[in-house]
Amino acid sequence: MAVRKIKYYKRRFTDNDFFKSDLSANKYFEQSHLSSLNRKVSLLPFKIGNINFVANSKFVEIVIPSREKYTNQSFPKWISGLIAYEGTILPVVDLPQLGNFRSSGEPFCTIIFSDGAFRFGIEADFVRFPFAHNAFSSIDASLFSTLKIQQRDYYFLNIEMIFELIRELEFE
Amino acid sequence: MSNIEQHIENFKETCRRHCDIIETCLLDYEKYRIAELLANTANSINQIRLSAKKLSVDNAAIIADAMLKVVSLAKENRLDLLPNDIDLILRANDFYYSIIQFSAYEILELLNSEFAIISEIAAELQSIAAPQRIKKVQSTVVKSETTSDEQQSKGILLEKFKYAIVRSVSTIEQVLEQSETQKEAIDVVPISQALNTIKGAAISAGVSKAFDLADAMGDFIRFLAENNVPINPYQMDLLLSCNRLFKEIAATSAIAIIDKIKDYSDYIDTYSDFLRSFLTEQEHLQPTPSAKLASDEIVPLISTVGASSDAASDGKLYYFGYKSSQLNDYSKYNRLLDATINIISNIVPISSSINNLKSLKSLIRQIQLDNNNILYNITNTEVLTEIAMNNAKKLEEIISQLDFHFATADEFLQNIKNRINTIYNGLYNFRSVAFGDVVRGYNELANDLARYSSKKVNLKITGRFVRVGSELYTLLEILLPQLLRDIIINNIEPPNLRKGKPEVAEISLSARTLSGKLLIEIIDDGKGVDASAISARLEGLINLISNNSGRIDISSEPNFGTKLSISFNMNYVLLKSLVFEVAGNLYAVQLLNCEALIDEKTFHKQHSNAKSIDMRKILGVEAEYIGKNKPVLLVNDFNGNIALIFDKFVGEAELVPTPANKLVSVTPFIAASSVYNNKPVMIIDVQKLLNISVN
């Protein structure tokens, strides 16, 4: 159910091109460096253990119930295993291991991220509805950066950085 | 087909092949008295005798035994065969000849009941070989060279052979052309008569090659007629080429005919190989009996479609003038179409069963209402008993209906499952091609290239049955001829420069699959040059390979030859494998590598000294008490069997391999990954695993 809603939500935003109502729709701003700062981003909030995360939902392909993983001791520590999805095999990133925090141990769902060329999964306890937020003003280049949205603390997850790690794994 | 039926089929086949030979040879012997003909006859009789013995019917081989005795005595010059004797042998031969027309059951009946006839023929034959007629063993005089008389008769036989070809070729051509222009099935009778004439003449002239080709043509045409398979343009072309070959052979004088056949022997071999390969392919594609029954309705539909469009000639591809074709085999489509129609027809009764379930639902609703009545009338026992009895009846009715519907639905579902399997197998055949289809015509190509560059080359192809993904087909069709051309032109020396090596250079082209990879190796025994020079020369082709996610390794040793090994990932081919579980993870072993699957107890009993590998240990997983009796997989190694011990056997599966990336290949013996029941499964490269465990 969650999966469907997320997809629907994403489509609604992109179809209506809600960015157009934004300042960045103006051609002047489109060319300026300000446009990227002022643009609102759709974020997907999710929770692992006691920590709330958000990730750019343009990378989210789908959210699926957790699956059995293939595990191997020789894998890098931040890879918790491999899962099968749509006939292919994807690595699952162990976020608690990367951020050095504790997980609940019983993840309910796996979020699958895709950048068109590579895909990976992150296991989460649950996922909330995405929302639009003017995020980039407070985001730095680290993997996790703190954000305060509606009086609640979130960690913004830099998905592009994880994609770089994954890219290194897939190609020698 | 039961074992005995199989033997009888073989026996019929042997009779069909050899009775002709016996007859022609004996008649020719009567005229020309050439000893070789008797040897041919004896050989053929022996073939019949051996296959008759296999039937394990007492009377089957009696006549053949007697015939063989007479003919071998005559062969050893201890018995003179008079015309009368030859008639008797021919009469015995006719007995076997007439057997061909009967069914298996009738043959058994005939052999068992007609003992009188059999013993009469056998007695006649024995009278020929009566003790008084048998000469004493001749002293071992060195056989004189063939006399001039014999030579003369041989010349006559060759002349006869030539004449037989000339006479038959025109008939064959006429019939083939007629069927081609009028798009009719081939008329079998005149063709097989003509071919039989050639076969008979060839065997008595001692030209076995021509006999082979005519035999292959005969088999092929007979097969087409028996199975109602439409001939495709490529096969027609092949038959016409065979015929042309005969024509060319007959165009020389009788004396030169033997040399001419030697010249053409390569062509003859390839042509008969081609024809026979069609035969074996067609046999593989035989539809299941049930599918065959229904396919009659579909055939005309498909064939009219094929005839109206130009699709029939689309299958041909031309490279260097060598025609190759993927078979326009409509029987494949027929089978799939038939299976689909069957599935649809099975779904209809299932849906009606579901409709009936709705009526059952209304019955149950009534029972619910009655239940409510029970609650209202809880004090009135009379009404209660009536309601209860009514309800019991209704329930019984419901159960019997449910049983009936379950049974029918089950049956039809099973039918659907079978059909889906057929479709699945058919699609599997579509998405891959046999390597033999890819390399069809390459022997010819190699020979012509060699002749063009005045070299002598023998191309050996192995792994014809390896399935290649259809996506690789076109790539290989471009790649392999170019590589062959390069090897023959550049790597092979002319015969006079091949010092210490056989004059005819050998090139071997082999294909095999190895845990999700297709390996093609081309090895020659040519002069061998610097590997870097070869890679510089083949740069374009190497780029082509690497662009298609392939890999080429070139190794070369001066004076010993060059080896090119090309490997491609096979994303399109299914690997039949056994799937096992170790510590919750799935691993698969290609069925090709498996010898046996047994349990731990039997393994310790029967193979107590065989080497075993505990998969938990080699994967670095802690040993854990799993169960008393773990599954043990015996895999074959050069040094004998080695046992792999897993936690649990999951099942047999057909996996689509994905080449291993850096992450998967952290475990060195994992060659590829795949998905089984929505779970990742790692495909084990057994050879690597064994190497690692040894080290």
Image (cartoon, coloured by chain):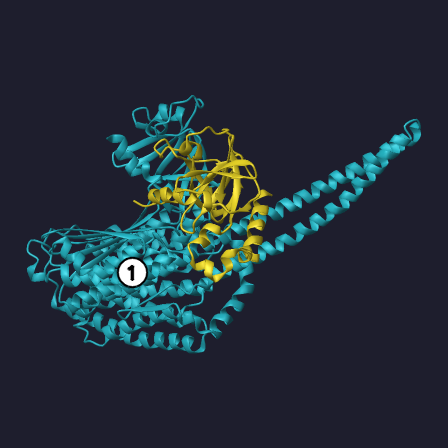
Chain colours: A yellow, B cyan
> Considering depth in this image, is A96 or B347 the residue closer to the camera?
A96
> Considering depth in this image, is B246 or B96 the residue closer to the camera?
B246
Residue at the (67%, 42%) spot, across then down? B406
Asked whether residue B552 appears in the rendered view, the answer is: yes
Residue to which mark 1 is pinned: B85
From the viewer's perspective, is residue B205 above or below residue B693?
Answer: below
Asked whether residue B440 appears in the rendered view, the answer is: no
In the rendered image, residue B133, in percent from the top left (x then y), is placed at 23, 54
In the rendered image, residue B196, in percent from the top left (x then y), is placed at 33, 67
Residue at the (53%, 51%) spot, across then down? B420
In the rendered image, residue A158, in percent from the top left (x then y), is placed at 43, 42
How many marks on residues? 1
> Considering depth in this image, is B147 or B530 the residue closer to the camera?
B530
B539 relative to A26 in the view: left or right: left
Around disc 1, counting alpha carbons within 10 Å, would you say few (fewer than 14), some (14 to 19), or many (20 or more)?
A: some
Amino acid type, label 1 = Asp
> Considering depth in this image, is B553 or B179 the residue closer to the camera?
B553
In which quadrant of the rendered image does the C terminus of chain B lie? top left
**Tag 1, which secondary structure?**
helix
In the rendered image, residue B507, in percent from the top left (x then y), is placed at 19, 56
B219 relative to B352 in the view: left or right: left
Residue at the (16%, 57%) spot, across then down? B534
Chain letter for mark 1? B
